[in-house]
Image: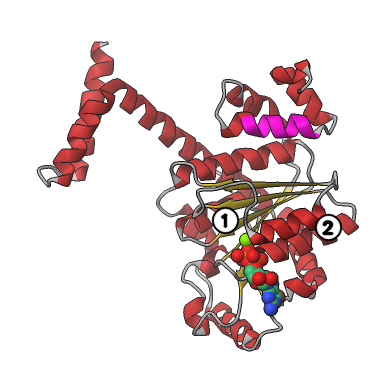
Amino acid sequence: MAPAQYNTVAGLVAGLESGNRRALARIISHIENNSELAQPLLAALYPRAGQAHIIGITGAPGTGKSTLVNALAGLYRQQDISVGIIAVDPTSPFSGGALLGDRVRMRDLAGDAGVFIRSMATRGSLGGLAQATADVIMVLDAAGFQRIIIETVGVGQSEVEIASTAYTTVVVEAPGLGDEVQAIKAGVLEIADIFAVNKADREGADRTAMALQMMLHLGAPDRQQTMHHGRMLPVSLPPDIAPDRQWTPPIFKTIATQKQGIEALLAGIEDHNRYLAESGTRQWRQYLRAATELRMILRDALLERVLQQLGEEAISETVQAVAQRRLDPYSAVRQLLEAYHHRINTA
Ligand SMILES: Nc1nc2c(ncn2[C@@H]2O[C@H](COP(=O)(O)OP(=O)(O)O)[C@@H](O)[C@H]2O)c(=O)[nH]1
Ligand SMILES: [Mg+2]
């Protein structure tokens, strides 16, 4: 039984501040279940967050991300730095650390009060998962974890979302995934702050590292430009925030299973952390995160309103019309919005 004070926002926040695990777990449950305490909790915690360095680890399945995160977390703990770990798997309908990497992690890091591990899996849409992940990151940040590591499987869009959430994005490659240059997916250069070529004990690691090096020399597309493109809210930056564009992603070879190369990788992450602070890029990314998050929440809230006003039947009729090609999707949306405006104006 949880203590009675953990039934209120104030009680939970006080519990979190005193470092109570059960309070932390309860807060995360409220948020994941979107209970009526979820939004008041997020509102209370938001001003307390903002101190953690958020590190994204992404790459194809099997490249060794979980093993690498485990090794990194162990090293941070040796330096007495607290670590929150969030494993996001949009492909798995299960959560709770059933994956091999997570079991290894549980064994190595279990019982350490300076580590908190959470697995999150798809419930509903990818957007929902991205938002839930952002919320849990914020809670761990408010709880005082100094580094928060997010492991995600690289599946297209979610990589970009994590890149706009993390301050430092580490892209993990491994040899033997086929042709080196082919295996290095398009778009990866835009999001990587750091590359880890893991499984360096395997044949081909040097070639993978060289292929990356070559692609970097050809010049990565400007990340700042890329992130501003299209699906972003307008951001007007204060004049004193001018991101420096001079960072060239370093490439580290690692053998995660033997904990080799981890010190250098961690040092690279911390170098990037310092670079972000000193160049003003960290603040710039904070603006980007705010814009991304607001956009996500606003889109969901507006959609919710439209659905409520028009009702399921009207929507499903429209879906049918589009599916049967009696109506194109753009005209359908225009009609739905017109109907929505008509409803609220006559209500
Ligand atoms: N040979 C070798 N195997 C590794 C290395 N790192 C991880 N592995 C193995 O690769 C497999 C996948 O690792 P995992 O961390 O679960 O990969 P993830 O899917 O990217 O999270 C496991 O069997 C690991 O033991 C490495 O550096 N060298
Ligand atoms: Mg994994």
Give the camera-side residue of 163 and 72.
Answer: 72
Tell whether position 279 is magenta.
Answer: no
Q: From where the camera sits, is residue 270 visible?
A: no
> Which dot, 1 or 2, sits closer to the camera?
2
Could you tell me residue 190's position as x and y percent?
53, 65
Number of residue marks: 2
Name the residue that disc number 2 marks. 76
Eyeballing the image, is 119 above or below 259? above
- In the rendered structure, the answer to whether residue 217 lies left or right of residue 341 reads right
Amino acid bearing label 1: Ala
Circle 1 packing at 10 Å, graded few (<14), some (14-19), many (20+), is: many
Q: Residue furthest left?
A: 326
Coloring applied to the structure: secondary structure
Q: What is the span of residues highlighted in magenta in the rendered image?
A: 21-29
Q: Secondary structure at mark 1?
A: helix
| Rendered-image quadrant of the C terminus | top left
Give the camera-side residue of 245 and 15.
Answer: 15
Amino acid bearing label 2: Tyr
